[in-house]
Image (tube, helix red, strand yellow):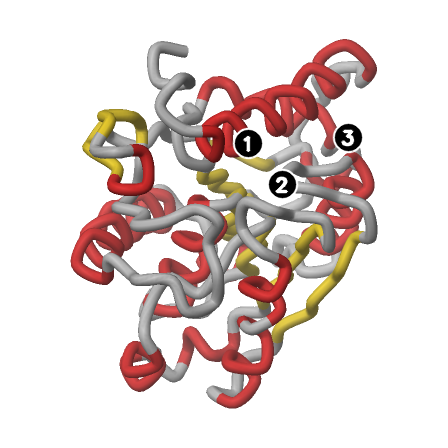
Amino acid sequence: MKYLFLTKPIVLLTITFTVTTLYIVYFQESPTPRRPDSMARSFVLWLHGLGDSGPANEPIKNFFTSPQFRNTTWSFPSAPSRPVSCNYGAVMPSWFDIHEIPVAAESPKDEDGLLKAVQNVHAMIDKEVAAGTNSENIFVCGFSQGGALTLASTLLYPKTLGGGAVFSGWVPFNTSVLGQIPPDAKKTPILWSHGIADSTVLFEAGQAGPPLLEQAGITCEFKAYPGLGHSISNEELRYLESWIKTRQQSSS
């Protein structure tokens, strides 16, 4: 809270998600523990937005009550604290630098900071693969800045993943990065969800992403949500559950 007086955008980036989280905590029941079954092990990595934290997002997993998630491991890492340009250099949790808010399709990009963050995400994925999880049962999801990092991390990973889900995100790199996408990464499906009323990461910033990906041969499903601002809705999470379920690999 010590940085809220600096600029209004940080309020939008943190508080709107808190409202969604509180709804999940108080109105969604926690799943009943079940014994592991024949479903293969899967892994969901969730990347939070600017100024937020991993633990604050953990209630999201309570939404995923289908039997297919019995053997799912969840991870909610927190970004390191660093100065952020769009908030006058204030130090806060941030995966990479953001130069301006609202974020538009042509906003300046911190590719150096982004690629360092991508390396850290890849290390988390590699650790899970080493533990025995099939890469095609690994799903990376993220909101806002975390959504932008999700996109870069899935596209630059050397193996095919189960999928990448971007919520209210944007393309955080220049088109030259598209030439660095490994062939297997192009097989990773992308789900992109964005609120039409988003005034923090503009809808046009999200809308510009899928055509760019499709030109590079990447499958991207784009879902627009009328009336939704810079937040995650229950409807989006319900669809995410269904989307992941259809892509989970069963054990052999």
Which residue is disc 2 drawn over?
A: 230
Kindly check if marks 1 and 3 are in contact, taking CB atoms under 8 A apart as contact: no
Q: Earlier in the sequence, mark 3 or mark 2?
A: 3
Q: Which residue is mark 3?
A: 65
CA gap, disc 1 and disc 3: 29 Å
Vertical arrangement, residue 144 with respect to residue 31, above or below: below
Q: Quadrant of residue 151?
A: bottom left
Residue denoted by label 1: 12
First along the sequence among labels 2 and 1: 1
**Is 202 situated above or below 18?**
below
- Horizontally, residue 50 falls left or right of residue 217, namely left
Left or right: 216 as drawn, with respect to 177? right
Q: Dots 2 and 1: beta carbons under 8 Å?
A: yes
Closer to the camera in the image, 173 or 249: 173
Residue 206 appears left or right of 150: right
Could you tell me which secondary element the residue under label 3 belongs to? loop
- Residue shown at 41% from the left, 28% from the top: 7
**Residue 123, percent across and down?**
25, 47
Circle 2 SS class: loop
* Label 1 Cα neighbours within 10 Å, binned few <14 / some 14-19 / many ≥20: some
Residue 108 image-quadrant placement? bottom left
